[in-house]
Amino acid sequence: MNEIYKTDALIAEDIDAYLDTHQHKTMLRFITCGSVDDGKSTLIGRLLYDSKMIFEDQLATLEADSRRVGTQGANIDFALLVDGLAAEREQGITIDVAYRFFATEKRKFIVADTPGHEQYTRNMVTGASTADLAVILIDARKGVLTQTRRHSYLAHLLGIRHLVLAVNKMDLIGYDQAAYDRILADYRAFADSIGVTDFTPIPISGLAGDNITTRSTNTPWHDGPTLLEYLETVELDQTTDQQKPFRMQVQWVNRPNLDFRGFAGTIAAGQIAVGDEIRVLPSGKTSTISRIVTLDGDLDVAVAGQAVTLCLADEIDCSRGQVITAANSPVEVADQFEASVIWMDEDTLVPGRAYWLKLGPLTVSATVAQPKYQINVNTMEHLAAKTLDLNAIGVANITTDREIPFAPYQDSRDLGGFILIDKMTNRTVGAGLIHFALRRAQNIHWQATDISRDHHASMKNQKPMVLWMTGLSGSGKSTIANLVEKKLARMNRHTFLLDGDNVRHGLNKDLGFTDADRVENIRRVGEVAKLMTDAGLIVITAFISPFRSEREMVRAMMQPGEFVEIFIDTPLEEAEKRDVKGLYAKARSGQLKNFTGIDSPYEAPEAPQIRIDTARMSAEDAADLIVSKLIP
Amino acid sequence: MSLRSLTHLQRLEAEAIHIMREVVSEAEKPVMLYSVGKDSAVMLHLAKKAFYPSPPPFPLLHVDTTWKFRDMYALRDRAARNAGMQLLVHQNPDAVRQGINPFDHGGLHTDMWKTEGLKQALDLHGFDAAFGGARRDEEKSRAKERIFSFRTASHRWDPKNQRPELWRTYNARKARGESMRVFPLSNWTELDIWQYIHLENIEIVPLYYAAERPTVIRDGLLLMVDDDRFPLKGEEPVMRRIRFRTLGCYPLTGAVESRATTLPEIIQEMLLTTTSERQGRAIDHDQTASMEKKKQEGYF
């Protein structure tokens, strides 16, 4: 029995001493990367087994399973210990991130176990996001492979500072030092090329136990640490983070009564002490820390990683999503960024579409521009890309709907890493790592004008609004829109009609009919309609506008209540039968691509303010109905 | 500048507090499921810390089966009162009416009281987020469970439809009718729980400590005869020095013979024992991957 685990005696003889040791353990989170063939599951299984994390009953199940579906003959198949869901056990592959736990005298470890297959970049990125360290497994017989490069690149991209190159299955190459050195040289050349300056190589055998917990006599030429020695002593991010300037994102404002107002959050970086001067961003207001409150009594000092409640000496505005920083070292504030984007959803990225962007506790609306390039994670090549598919990684500009406090991802995971959420499905569709703010955002300020939008509107004696007509091609949008405008004109209302076809001859003549172009088409029309409402006009639009997301994006651009969604509801068969412009015929014969209703979807409004059933109502009656609803 | 390395328990504590604050900020109507066990005790303690000096801004919900140990009911009421929190108790009225019990109804007992009872209670009060004390180390199918676990409007868990969780940024958005179960103790192990209870001096049900109690042995489980509803089949209850590693319905929860009467002794015993804690629960023995199946149906 080896040294590190010779604890049973201590437990039995002096439990208090044991507990004292174990209450002072630190914690390391790491990720293991490698495919089934590299012996990853065997390695994790061994770590769990050696640190007594497997109980007798689990072992009995494991032995039974090993006989039933294992791949190691009569021996224990550790791989079975580390895959979980019944469905994937039958498939024989791991399809998700699993978290495992084990502990030694010095540390508790949380292992993110992720599969190595290319299609599961999403899982590896998820596992890497919380890891301080990555163990990159290599099969000594095979050397540096495409997947080794991919794993290393992703670990580096996600900001993991400590890489272990575990050259496994050394027993199968007879512990050949020359072969090991060749693998190291290959890897070092690759590591340099992606900016990894430092890594720790260890020759191991997960199966035979070489250099895992004890130094192997088979590799006397290895003068580095064993895997566990390294895991137990490597510097933790939590320690490094304390040495950076103070930052805390506010999660929750604690206000039990009028006498107490505290800002609750987890300290992202640095240290804070009572009396320290702080600055709140984006407002830039300053104050000093009056108390650091916890249930166990006030603290004098708190450090990165602690969840605390801060009280300030002054009554300044500060709410969820804002950032409290050291007064003399604030973070940047911007609304346009360049970022790496990792796409995680079956539905591809739609450039220009508004997604929710969540950066820690802060949620804002944001759009992703067409990627500058996509990265081939196997070769690191930059490829041209119009969008990003599931598991693709690219670099793109991001625009948020307001200025947010942030830090580059390489300085702070908390302030530089964000997720993207689809506004319709609520799924987490992407992750992003901020590189830097775009200069143009910082240099363009809003020009204050003296004649306000209210003034514009009152001169015209009307409430500005946008009558947004949506429906299939040939549903009657333009006809009805035209009639509505005529009726309003007769009532002395100042109006303007933006028609889909007309706009595509001018403002939007550079756009086609792909999903991304359709989104951009609507975004521009939305912006124009917004300017017109600022000028006090009643804007009538007639656009197919097939996607709910974009109609909601335009609604969000307008003042509350000024956007009126009108669904011109004509069934596809009916619109196709009418086919006024002959477009359906062309689309059916394949001459016209991406035609809404034929080979491009139409997402009908779920709760339009006004619905016009054109099968039951003439265009004239429809226009009357709309006008009567809007102008009582 | 002096650097302070946080201990693993301090980091686990901070993580759980962070998760609870996220839920309170993002959910419309959160609730904490409180089963009176040691994990619930830790979760409740963490909730007090997360929101201090405010009381935790959500109620406690006990999905009761009427078959818990008497000691559990006593602690339940006291703990809620001490925390200044509202305690909601739900007993499935159908199960009450039909007199569902673990002796006559087997698997139906868990189905109706717990699985159905939980769904009923969540629907009845319109809770959209429920904290649970489950841990990833408990069982294989839980190793991949998210911290924020999404359920359809019919409370089903779809393994394919769970969201990636990056950093400590959680996506809590959902459609009306959908709900989430949130597990702040996901990354704790059984040892962490015991150490934390010891360190923070958290009150737990006395049944965790060894004492002389009336017992019978049935189907390989050492059961405690907690009240006179226990139908004896000619068995004579024997006083044994026992304790429980995990607590549930008393007719379904196996005890272990033990001399551990203090927390360090419990931890000592746990570290030297060779069976995992869920083995004391009859529920897991049904079939392979049984927890996964139960989870899909809406049991925790």
Image (cartoon, rainbow, N blue to C red):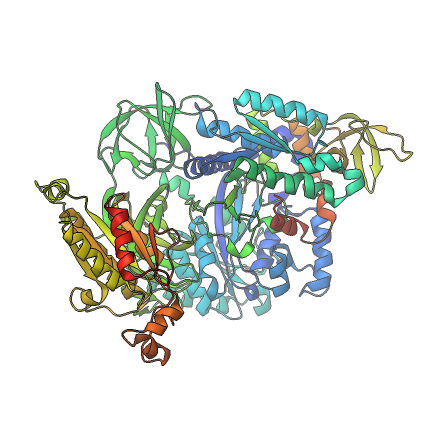
The front one of A580 and A547 is A580
Q: Quadrant of residue B25?
A: top left
Q: Is residue B203 left or right of residue A148?
A: right
The front one of A362 and A38 is A362
A260 over B223 or under it: above or below: above
Residue B8 visible, this angle: yes
Where is residue A76? Give x, y as percent: 69, 59
The front one of A468 and B38 is A468
Q: Is residue A478 left or right of residue A32?
A: left
Residue at left 89%, top 33%? B235
Where is residue A603? Give x, y as percent: 38, 60
Where is residue A149? Give x, y as percent: 42, 65
A545 over B235 or under it: above or below: below
Residue at left 27%, top 52%? A626
Quadrant of the frame with the C terminus of chain A: top left
Q: Quadrant of residue B111?
A: top right
The front one of A114 and A26 is A114
Q: Quadrant of residue A264?
A: top left
Residue sitting farthest toward the top: A259
How many tags in the picture?
Answer: 0
Residue A401 visible, this angle: no
Where is residue A237? Give x, y as percent: 40, 44
Q: Is residue A151 left or right of residue A100?
A: left
Residue sitting farthest toward the right: B234
